[in-house]
Amino acid sequence: MELDFDLDKIGITEFGIGLEDDEGVQQFCCMTIDSDIQSALQEMTIATWSAMNKLDRDPPLYDPSNKHESPEYVHLPIDDELATQLRLLHFANNLPINSNALADPDKVLCYFARLTDAEGRRLTALRRATHFKGVLKNRMILLQLITNALQLIEEKVFRLDNDFDLLVDSTTLHIFRPNSFEFLGRLREALLAAVPDNIREIEGDLTFVDFTHVQDYAMKHTRAARYLASIRSQKLTENINESALKETCTEQGVNFTEVDGMVVVQDGHIMGFLEVLDRRRYRVNLVEDSPERYKATARRKIK
Amino acid sequence: MVLSSISPLFIIWAIRGNSLVPDIYFLVFCALMVFIPNIFIWLRLRTAIRLEEKRELIVGRADDSRDHILVYLFTMLLPFYTTNLDTWRDLVAALVALGFIVFLFWHLNLHYMNILFAAFGYRIFTIYAPLDSNIFTSKSGLVLITKRVTINIGQHLTVFSLSETVYFEV
């Protein structure tokens, strides 16, 4: 996968901080930095891109229902609903400068670099603030050149990491650490908010299923909301055969009833039903007369 | 920057002199009030360039703030130029009034008003980001000191940061 940015011709490097207040309101601002920090941020970006390419040159689409490794290179189109928060940050113009942004480290959510190349293209690189804040709390020891004695640093110290969690260019989110993306992209909120839309879309394909209970359940359970987002984004309900679906549900122990010709999934079996639709339940018949049923926490279609 | 913006006033005061304070002290005081803030600005600008404190501004609207110079003249130079400083009470009152105006200039972000910039051919624009529904895009104006005569909408400018709201284009 290509990056819509020329890492060999970086023109401007800006540094920013993401803050979250006690009410959960996020804001992003920039801080002025010297050329050494600019070089460090550029090196981090190049290291991230290089590590991503070593992992996977053809990264799969981010699947909200998969359990991901960390790191694992996946991608997401920037116009995807799940990318809303980071898309807003990437396309925001003239972010305000706040030289006191680090005054309260507990509010620091992430830090980011905003790079502009010679052609004016922008790249946003984000890192969740964990070590960045952590070092601040523990004073560092330092080898003094004059005395060779270790000393405690009294000043506030922030530490940059070796790489970023994700890169955002004009078309794509290149995700290196999916867990951080989920945290920074406020995915939980986005997934729950997207449930009614996802249900509406899926209902259009499965007109013989009553989704009322499924929607109520998914509005309260993030894992179910993740399955719905995955099913919709991968168009997994297109052309599903009614009898084949009923047969698979029976085979997988997913209980349902039929009311006025509509399939109604029983309470306690909604997750199982969503797992069937999300192609997570499968059966293996390697032992004669002893079929085994499994659930996949992550899966990838074999071509 | 605020002190630098009022430095011309001290030039005028130095020329007028004062009957309360001996010239040598008054002139030194005025000279310091002229040179120190401007040297500081020059150092700040040089440091910003040396450390490459660059950022990109995208223009949605650019207002020529030339009229602010008039505000500056009428609130700062003209009233204080005519102030009588012949008694201690007048002198203290003038300094306190000056303090209030300095605070207001600072508080209202008008500290970029500087005759020196104008003398070197720089203009002052207030730049606003393009209007969009993005909640993170800055809605407040940023001051740009530049030699450009006009700035077009949509233009991407590479500028040096002098303060959180004031930028300089070389």
Image (cartoon, coloured by chain):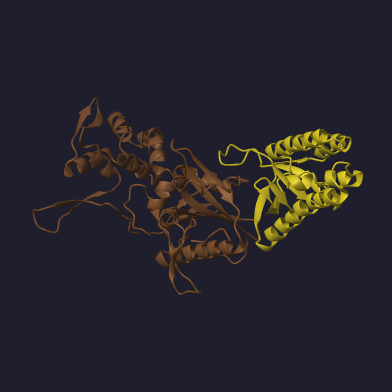
> x%, y% of residue A75?
44, 54
Q: Which chain is yellow?
A: B
Q: Taking B97 as reference, is B24 left or right?
A: right
> x%, y% of residue B20?
85, 41
Q: Taking A238 as reference, is B64 left or right?
A: right
Chain A: its colour in the image is brown
Toward which corner of the image does residue B67 lie, by quadrant?
A: top right
Toward which corner of the image does residue A55 lie, by quadrant?
A: bottom left
Give the vertical position of A50 relative to A204 (above or below): below
Question: Which residue occupies the foreground of this view, B36 or A162?
Answer: B36
Residue lying farthest to the right in this orientation: B16
**Residue A284 appears in the picture as rendered:** yes
Give the vertical position of B16 relative to A134 (above or below): above
Question: Which residue occupies the foreground of this view, A206 or A296?
Answer: A296
Question: Which residue occupies the foreground of this view, B5 or A89?
Answer: B5
Residue lying farthest to the top in this orientation: A260
> x%, y% of residue A176?
42, 58
Give the vertical position of B26 relative to B131 (above or below): below
Q: Taking B86 as reference, is A93 left or right?
A: left
Q: Taking A28 as reference, is A119 left or right?
A: right
Q: Quadrant of the C terminus of chain A?
A: bottom left
Q: Residue at x 63, y 38 (%)?
A: B139
> x%, y% of residue B18?
88, 42
Q: Residue at x 42, y 39 (%)?
A: A190
**Residue B121 appears in the picture as rendered:** no
